[in-house]
Image (tube, grey):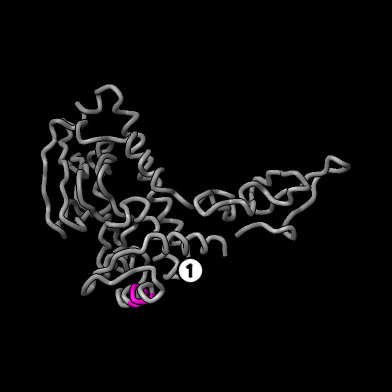
Amino acid sequence: MRCSPSLLRRTGAGTARRIACSCSRSRASVNADGRRCRRCSPSTSASSQLCIGSGRSLRIESSDWAEVRRRGLRPQDFPEARVVRLPRGAWVCEEGRPADGTVWFVVAGEVHVLTELPDGGQAIPYALGPGDLFGDLATLLPRRRRTASVRTAQASILLQISPQAWQRAAERPGFAARHEATLFARFLLLDEALRRMAMKSARDRLLMLLAERIARFGAEAPLPTHAALAMMIGCTRERATRLLGAFVREGLLRREGRGRYAVEAEAIRAAYSRLWRA
């Protein structure tokens, strides 16, 4: 939500009085003649940071993901790893099973992280793609059980890294910094998932999810199944199917065969920007 003059509060006294913008929790002051903070300026473009509540950006652009990938871990960091090719729908690890210290690196494809819900259902908080890592936290506490399940969303190529191979890789120069960048990418995914699920409307959650996928995987990446989308946005499969049909009618998606859709990237980006300016 953008700030407006009615939301501004005067602070200080005399000719040096300044105005604090209510959109920022820090109440960073700005010049009184500006009437708005820099984040909420009308000149802010669609690709710039958007001011929502705390004034933080809710947009992570493709260039941001590319930079994180560039600084993160690479397949070359694991010369001793075993290459594993898995078809769509294959289970890599299961929640609750003992963790043996094996780490997995995604070379190609896409995998979904699934968590059990109290009512017995499952949710998919986020997806992992090329350059992402999972199972590495178990290397710190190898006797712990897996905290989530991982299943391939499409045919994928993974590196299976044994605890010994991981330890030797971790001793190489520069590994710690690249691992930190990869962990940061996972933090961004979790942060986006929390923001998405805080939305009251399933339609808005789906719109945000599609915008996230375009930024991370590109417009050509195939969409998950209807069931997977439902678990990602917290609704029933039937509701997800109806939303996809509505997005086709709105020009946000186009149908490419039975149950398959392609994204209209520019239309989704524009709708996503309007969502945060509403």
Amino acid on which the number 1 mark rests in the picture: Lys
From the viewer's perspective, tell me whether residue 114 is left or right of residue 204. Answer: left
For disc 1, the marked residue is 200
The structure residue drawn at horizontal position 36% and vertical position 36%, both measured from the top left corner, is: 181
Callout 1 secondary element? loop
Is residue 78 or residue 248 the one in the foreground?
Answer: 248
The structure residue drawn at horizontal position 42% and vertical position 48%, both measured from the top left corner, is: 61
Where's residue 248, x and y in %? 35, 73
Where's residue 90, x and y in %? 14, 57
Q: Does residue 108 lie above or below 198 as drawn?
A: above
The structure residue drawn at horizontal position 28% and vertical position 72%, both measured from the top left corner, is: 255
The image quarter containing residue 197 is bottom left
From the viewer's perspective, tell me whether residue 170 is left or right of residue 118. Answer: left
Residue 244 magenta-highlighted: yes
Dominant secondary structure of the residues highlighted in magenta in the image? helix
The structure residue drawn at horizontal position 40% and vertical position 47%, both measured from the top left corner, is: 188
- The segment highlighted magenta reads 242-246
